[in-house]
C-alpha cells in the first residue's frame, strides 16, 4: 500500500461553517465539532466502531453521516495517526479507510460540487495529550476512557482550525501586499 499523506489546512477551503473531526480508534471513534466561525473545537460524542476493514459499512459510518447532517458540516477532518518520524501505521490505514468510506457515502448524498470534503490531518500524540489533560483535570482512568476519544478529536480539530486560520490569514496578507505593490507600480491615469 502506498504511503498515506495528510492534507494541509486551508487548501481548497470550503469557507465558513462547522467542521467535524474524527479520532478513529480500533474500538471507538471520537467526534468533535467547531463553532460556525471555525475557531473553537468542542466534543460531540463517542461512536462505537462497527465497520471492519473488510466488510460493509456499519452503524458507525451511518452515525457519522447523521452528525454531519445534524451540524450541517462543511468539512470532515479525520486524524491520521503517524509516528514522530512521520511514518504511517496500521492505525493510519484504519483512519484512511474510515475517511474513504465517509467520503464515498457523502458523495452519494450530494452532487459532487456540493459534497462535503473529507480531509486527513496529521495526528501525532493527540490521544496522549488528551489523556494527560483529562488526568490533570481529575478524571479517573475509568471515566476518562469514555471521553478520551472525544478529547483527542478536539485536539485534532483545534490543530486543524488553527492551521486553517493561519493559512487563510497568510493568504489574505499576501493578497493585500500584492495589491499594494501593484498599485505602486501601476501608471497613473491622472493627466496632471
Image: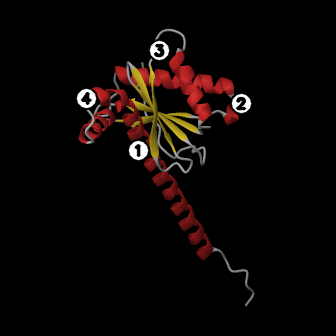
Q: In the rendered image, which residue does mark 4 sit on?
A: 141
Q: In the rendered image, which residue does mark 3 sit on?
A: 50
**How many residues crowd around disc 3 within 10 Å: few (fewer than 14), some, or many (20 or more)?**
some
Q: Is residue 71 left or right of residue 122?
A: right
Between discs 3 and 1, the one toward the N terminus:
3
Q: CA distance from mark 4 to mark 1?
A: 25 Å
- Mark 3: which secondary structure? loop
Q: CA distance from mark 3 to mark 1?
A: 27 Å
Q: CA distance from mark 1 to mark 2?
A: 29 Å
Q: CA distance from mark 4 to mark 2?
A: 44 Å
The quadrant where residue 189 appears: bottom right
Q: What residue is shown at x 48% (from left), y 44% (from top)?
A: 9
Q: In the rendered image, which residue does mark 1 sit on?
A: 159
- Mark 1: which secondary structure? helix
Frontmost of labels 3 and 4 is: 4
Q: Is residue 61 left or right of residue 3?
A: right
For the residues bearing labels 4 and 2, Cβ distance under 8 angstroms: no
Q: CA distance from mark 2 to mark 3?
A: 27 Å
For the residues bearing labels 3 and 1, Cβ distance under 8 angstroms: no
**How many residues crowd around disc 1 within 10 Å: few (fewer than 14), some, or many (20 or more)?**
some
Q: CA distance from mark 3 to mark 4?
A: 24 Å
Q: In the rendered image, which residue does mark 2 sit on?
A: 111
Amino acid at each position: 500500500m502506498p504511503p498515506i499523506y495528510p492534507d494541509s489546512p486551508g487548501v481548497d477551503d470550503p469557507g465558513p461553517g462547522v467542521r467535524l473531526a474524527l479520532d478513529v480508534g480500533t474500538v471507538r471513534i471520537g467526534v468533535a465539532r467547531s463553532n460556525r466561525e471555525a475557531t473553537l473545537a468542542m466534543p460531540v460524542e463517542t461512536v462505537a466502531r462497527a465497520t471492519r476493514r473488510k466488510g460493509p459499512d456499519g452503524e458507525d459510518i451511518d452515525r457519522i453521516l447523521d452528525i454531519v447532517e445534524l451540524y450541517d458540516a462543511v468539512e470532515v477532518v479525520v486524524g491520521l495517526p503517524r509516528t514522530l518520524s512521520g511514518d504511517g501505521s496500521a492505525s493510519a490505514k484504519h483512519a484512511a479507510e474510515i475517511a474513504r468510506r465517509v467520503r464515498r457515502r457523502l458523495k452519494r448524498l450530494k452532487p459532487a460540487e456540493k459534497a462535503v470534503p473529507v480531509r486527513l490531518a496529521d495526528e501525532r500524540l493527540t490521544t496522549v495529550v488528551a489523556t494527560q489533560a483529562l488526568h490533570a483535570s481529575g478524571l479517573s482512568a475509568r471515566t476518562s476512557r469514555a471521553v478520551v476519544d472525544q478529547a483527542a478529536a478536539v485536539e485534532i480539530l483545534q490543530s486543524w482550525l488553527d492551521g486553517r486560520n493561519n493559512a487563510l490569514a497568510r493568504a489574505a496578507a499576501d493578497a493585500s501586499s500584492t495589491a499594494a505593490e501593484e498599485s505602486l507600480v501601476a501608471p497613473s491615469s491622472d493627466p496632471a
